Amino acid sequence: MERLERQFYDLPTLELTEKLLGKIFVRVLPGNIQLKGRIVETEAYFSRHDEACHAWRGKTERNRIMFQTPGTLYVYFTYGNHYMLNIVSEPENTPGAVLIRAMEPVEGELFMQEQRGSKLITDLMSGPGKLTRALAINRECNGKNLFSEEFFVENTPPLPDRMIGTSARVGISKSRELLWRKFIINNPHVSKFRT
């Protein structure tokens, strides 16, 4: 499959949040271990008006990666126990990112099962903390990009509108009225959460 080029990530954040659905996220580990997941759920975070965005109060040492060029990986540690994977999505010096909330395993399931300590395929990457553990993503990945031999995204045909759902974002307390979460309808790998 062909890889997504840099210009793909120049899409406006809300559009990118939807266009990433169905694409194949790839991580290649030493020893040519290929891990692949189909992106099935995303959330947008951007602008100074979005109080749930890390950069809404300005640039800090923690969020500085959000101000880099589109296609950069913004990885941070949260809730004291897991990492979150984001793809920077706004022009340089403008904060914005798409949180990858869930993936469907495509390749490397055995490695993912060992990483997660779970054999249930639909549980391996059905949440933002689960997928980073399955892909062995940690703080060292922060600031890397999707144009290397380690990380890239493979293109797939666009999904029809009828397959794409929209909702409020999950697990936040501010700017909850924004309908910036996108997901593939009826996909069993979409995250499970309490409403």
Image (cartoon, rainbow, N blue to C red):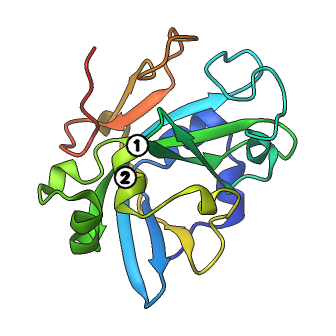
Quarter assignment of residue 59: top right
The amino acid at mark 2 is: Leu
- How packed mark 1 is, by other alpha carbons closer than 10 Å (few <14, some 14-19, many 20 or more), is many
Q: Quadrant of the N terminus?
A: bottom left
Question: Where is 73 relative to 4, above or below?
Answer: above
The amino acid at mark 1 is: Pro
Label 1: element kind: helix
* Residue situated furthest right in the rendering: 93
- Residue 194: x %, y % from top left: 25, 19
Q: Quadrant of the C terminus?
A: top left
- Residue 109: x %, y % from top left: 23, 69
- Residue 163: x %, y % from top left: 30, 38
Question: Where is 34 relative to 54, above or below?
Answer: below
Q: Residue placed at 75% from the left, 48% from the top?
A: 65
| Residue occupied by mark 2 | 131
Are the residues at dot 1 and dot 2 in contact (C-beta closer than 8 Å)? yes
* Residue situated furthest bottom in the rendering: 31
Horizontal side, residue 42 vs residue 68: left or right: left
Q: Residue placed at 16% from the left, 57% from the top?
A: 118
- How packed mark 2 is, by other alpha carbons closer than 10 Å (few <14, some 14-19, many 20 or more), is many
Quarter assignment of residue 63: top right
Q: Residue placed at 50% from the left, 11% from the top?
A: 173
Disc number placed over residue 128 in the picture, else none = 1
